[in-house]
Amino acid sequence: MPLKNVFVLDTSALLALRGDEPGADRVESLLMQAEGGRCRLLVSFMSRMELLYCVWREEGEEAARQVLRLIDCFAMEWVSCEPGILEIASRLKAQARLSVADSWIGATAIACEATLIHKDPEFTKFKEIPQEPLRR
């Protein structure tokens, strides 16, 4: 059962915000709530890696570094590799065709009893992951 007002932002949510895609308004609202102390926003270390390599690949290293500097200004807590999350991520990966990164991100939501904010249809098959899909 997710804790009220605790959320994990998936990489897709952060990219939606950056690209002003559908769902960006919800992510922006959560960021404003977190800034005001009305919710907690968590982000997996794997999302940091995904942001870095996705932007680097498409726009170059400097753009990728700028994205990380911007993200680091937000009221978010970075969640790193922890043994409990590792166990859950391994189970998720074993159960279905989920990427390694998405396994870690989904496991972070489960372990932290947080609602996952995402645009990734792969997560919807996991009933144990508390989630809120963004508009696509």
Image (spheres, rainbow, N blue to C red):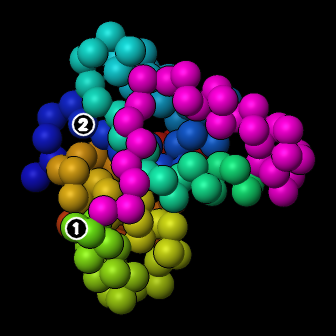
Looking at numbered disc 1 in the image, what kind of residue is underneath it?
A: Gly
User: For residue 5, what is the image quadrant?
Assistant: top left
Marks 2 & 1, CB-CB < 8 Å contact: no
**Residue 52 shows up from this direction:** yes
Question: Along the polypeptide, which appears first: circle 2 or circle 1?
Answer: 2
Determine whether, in the image, residue 73 is placed left or right of residue 79.
right
Disc number for residue 34: none
Mark 2 residue element: strand
Q: Is residue 69 magenta-colored? A: yes
In the rendered image, the residue lying farthest to the top is 36
Disc number for residue 84: 1
Disc number for residue 6: 2
Please tell me which residue lies in front, 4 or 59: 59
**Residue at position x 35%, y 21% from top?**
34
Highlighted range, magenta: 55-82
Residue 43 appears at what percent x and percent y? 43, 45
User: For residue 125, what is the image quadrant?
Assistant: bottom left
Q: Nearer the viewer, mark 2 or mark 1?
A: 1
**Residue 127 shows up from this direction:** no
Category of crowding for the residue at label 2, using alpha-carbon neighbours closer than 10 angstroms: few (below 14), some (14–19), many (at least 20) = some
Residue 80 higher or lower than 97, as above or below: above
Please tell me which residue lies in front, 115 or 43: 43
Mark 1 residue element: helix
**Residue at position x 26%, y 69% from top?**
83
Residue 88 higher or lower than 75, as above or below: below
**Residue at position x 73%, y 57% from top?**
53
**Residue at position x 32%, y 57% from top?**
108
